[in-house]
Image (spheres, coloured by chain):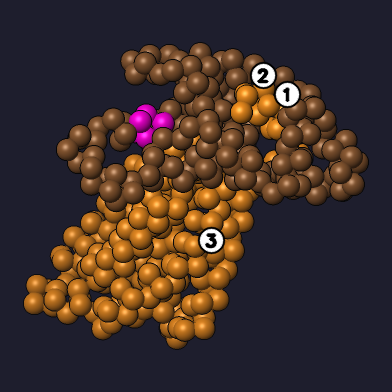
Chain colours: A brown, B orange
């Protein structure tokens, strides 16, 4: 992580790949009692990774990174359980009012994430696709789309923040 | 979305790292203090006998021991609570110290001042102004800290907000104390404490609503 914050993109990619494996095991263990489906586990893993990415400046580099990662994972797992809990604890006889009141779905699903991604305006979607599908760097994408590298980076960062906010909105 | 795709996106966004949260917090605190001081000098002024009182009047000096004694540990706390792995830990017990000193000062005051003057000492000359100005002067530092905390990732948003409120209130109360003519610890224990508590409550509520991430 230290190398990544210092600007080493390859180191960051390796870290994230290792991290996704470790987190998958952690989340699975954390959800052992709640019988989560594999795609639910994966949703939480992604939410944790996004939070780690957007909040990596809150890691104190003089301290070991493990507890910091675990603290973020714990927070996000609790959030997720809370969302699910609210969904399952609603008594059936109150359900009708909630439905009539247009009660919205609390839990976030993979399709919410996909909706955010497809809801991005054309340019941003092109950028995200070029980076994810074709594995281009920000510089390559910039050259291809005739944009500056900075503009590509800004657009990508905005898209990631929008993604994090989707999780946030379904929380309260 | 596949996790591998997310990893590609995150790696490509590697250069976007924000400045360390501790730096952001310290800058916010400094800006908030400067704004609160500017606010103080536009609406109030340091009392005329300040330079005498600060060297000769124990009661006046104690007002700063108490208010800064709260602001300092609260500042350390808010720095810790801005991080997901930061806990109040033993640091929160440092807050007991200014409160214990205040209790001792009140006890001493009750020894020195005859009982039929207690009421006058506790009410002072401007109790309502104290309750009003401490929250008002806290607004800018509290706002600055809350904005900075939004860049953080507090595991306990309510506690982080309350700590931000306490730092702000401590600074505001110390500023107000340079104006305020009421020096009795009995006055401080009632009206300063009420003013500070209002700000802590506002901070906790705001933290709970604004600092989730």
Q: CA distance from mark 3 to mark 1?
A: 34 Å
| Label 2 sits on residue | A17
Residue at position x 51%, y 77% in the image: B39
Q: Are marks 1 and 2 in contact (CB under 8 Å)?
A: yes
Q: Give the CA distance from mark 3 to mark 2.
A: 37 Å
Residue A81 is a magenta residue: yes
Q: Do callouts 1 and 2 point to residues on the same chain?
A: yes
For the residues tagged 3 and 1, is the chain the same? no
Residue A74 drawn at (x, y percent): 44, 27
Horizontal side of residue B42 vs B165, given as left or right: right
Left or right of residue B183: residue B78? right
- Mark 3 against mark 2, which lies toward the viewer? 2
Give above or below for B175 relative to B106. below
Q: Residue furthest bottom?
A: B48
Q: Which residues are magenta?
A: A79-84
Name the residue carrying label 1. A13
Q: Nearer the viewer, residue B99 or A140?
A: A140
């Amino acid at each position: 992580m230290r190398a990544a914050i210092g600007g080493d993109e390859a180191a960051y990619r390796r870290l994230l790949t290792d991290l996704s494996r470790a987190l998958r095991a952690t989340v699975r263990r954390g959800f052992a009692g709640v019988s989560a489906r594999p795609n639910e586990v994966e949703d939480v893993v992604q939410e944790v990774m996004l939070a780690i990415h957007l909040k990596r400046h809150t890691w104190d580099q003089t301290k070991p990174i493990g507890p910091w990662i675990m603290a973020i994972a714990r927070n996000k797992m609790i959030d997720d359980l809370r969302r699910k809990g609210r969904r399952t604890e609603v008594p059936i006889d109150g359900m009708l009012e909630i439905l009539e009141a247009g009660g919205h779905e609390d839990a976030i699903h993979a399709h919410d994430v996909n909706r955010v991604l497809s809801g991005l305006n054309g340019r941003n979607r092109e950028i995200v696709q070029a980076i994810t599908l074709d594995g281009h760097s920000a510089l390559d994408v910039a050259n291809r789309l005739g944009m500056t590298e900075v503009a590509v980076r800004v657009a990508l960062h905005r898209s990631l923040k929008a993604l994090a906010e989707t999780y946030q909105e379904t929380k309260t | 979305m596949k996790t591998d795709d997310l990893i590609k996106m995150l790696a490509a966004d590697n250069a976007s790292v924000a400045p360390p949260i501790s730096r952001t917090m310290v800058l916010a605190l400094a800006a908030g203090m400067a704004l609160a001081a500017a606010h103080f000098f536009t609406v109030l002024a340091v009392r005329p006998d300040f330079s005498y009182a600060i060297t000769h009047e124990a009661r006046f000096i104690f007002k700063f021991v108490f208010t800064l004694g709260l602001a300092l540990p609260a500042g350390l706390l808010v720095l810790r609570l801005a991080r997901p792995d930061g806990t109040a830990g033993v640091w929160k017990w440092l807050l007991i110290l200014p409160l214990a000193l205040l209790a001792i000062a009140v006890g001493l005051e009750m020894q020195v001042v005859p009982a039929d003057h207690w009421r006058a000492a506790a009410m002072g000359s401007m109790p309502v102004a104290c309750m009003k100005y401490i929250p008002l002067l806290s607004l800018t530092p509290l706002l600055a800290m809350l904005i900075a905390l939004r860049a953080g990732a507090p595991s306990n948003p309510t506690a982080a907000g309350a700590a931000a409120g306490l730092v702000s209130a401590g600074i505001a109360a110390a500023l107000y104390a340079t104006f305020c003519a009421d020096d009795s610890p009995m006055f401080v224990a009632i009206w300063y404490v009420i003013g500070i508590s209002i700000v802590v409550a506002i901070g906790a509520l705001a933290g709970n609503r604004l600092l989730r991430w």
